[in-house]
Amino acid sequence: MTRPDSIAAPEALHPSLWRASQLAHSATRCIDTGHPALSAQLPGGGWPVGTLIDLLLQQPGIGELRLLRPALLKVARRRIVLLQPPHPPQALALAALGLEPSQLIWLRSSRSADALWAAEQVLRSGSCGALLFWPGHAGHNHARGETLRRLHLAAQSGETLFFMLRPLAAAQDASPAPLRLSLRPAAGGIDIGFVKRRGPQRDAPLFLPLTPSLLQRHASLDRPLPAPAPARGILPELVG
């Protein structure tokens, strides 16, 4: 009879297996979130690269960029793409995060098909450190399952840190993303809900304190970045 202590660990049988009581080992490289309490709740101890990460927001501007700041700073040498942000990126706010305009590419399109095409090109090019994509502001409010699968597949072709920022209502829809978090504003920070992760279910949200941004203190002094590039013009930016 096989002794219980000699049973192979699930991940030894296949990297996609894990015990229900434990966080899974990440099959890809992870970037530290910069928030120890959050990293401790994520498989691999950070944001996985080369995969779709679904961030579901109660509303834009609740601290999502401050949440992502430590990770973005780690990958900014390969530039960061902001695709279809709900508001023009503000130079002062980005500087307060430690991000210079020269590190960023701002893309906008009036057609959702062009925005999707641009996202796939960014992910497949391998030349950018991170892509933040707000599909709800690409002319439609619902990213279909086929769209999510295409983007997830494109992300797997490289090591780009890829976040989709969508309305909280999208939490009810299926997604191929192995990591899905809900973000809600809270006094002094945000509440993070674990909609989906490879590990045990966590019902209680994680409160994460966030320092107020410089923009909140000096909003009248801020100015937007230069005009965005058209989504269909992304290739020259990536290879230039």
Image: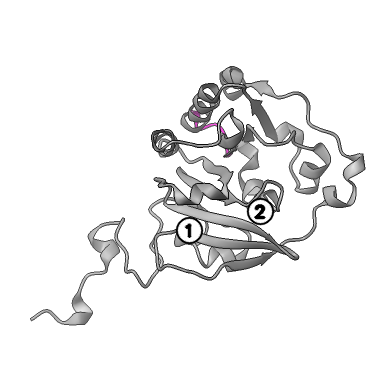
Q: Is residue 92 above or below residue 4?
A: above
Does the magenta-highlighted stretch encompass residue 127? yes
Q: Dividing the picture into quarters, in which one does residue 80 lie?
A: top right
Q: Is residue 217 left or right of residue 28?
A: right
The residue positioned 34% from the left and 69% from the top of the image is 20
Q: Is residue 229 left or right of residue 1?
A: right
Residue underneath mark 2: 70
Residue range in magenta is 125-130
Residue 221: x %, y % from top left: 92, 40
Which quadrant, please, contains the C terminus? top right
* Residue 144 seen in render: yes
Q: How many marks?
A: 2
Q: Nearer the viewer, residue 69 or 164?
A: 164
Does the magenta-highlighted stretch encompass residue 16? no
* Label 1 Cα crowd, 10 Å radius (few <14 / some 14-19 / many 20+): some
Residue underneath mark 1: 195
Type of residue at label 1?
A: Val
Circle 2: element type: helix
Residue 19: x %, y % from top left: 32, 69
Mark sitting earlier along the chain (2/1):
2
SS assignment for the magenta stretch, majority: loop
Q: Nearer the viewer, residue 177 or 22?
A: 177
Q: Are marks 2 and 1 in contact (CB under 8 Å)?
A: no
Q: Is residue 202 left or right of residue 153?
A: right
Q: Is residue 13 above or below residue 52?
A: below
Residue 200: x %, y % from top left: 40, 68
Q: Give the CA distance from mark 2 to mark 1.
A: 22 Å
Circle 1: element type: strand
The residue positioned 70% from the left and 35% from the top of the image is 103
Which quadrant, please, contains the N terminus? bottom left
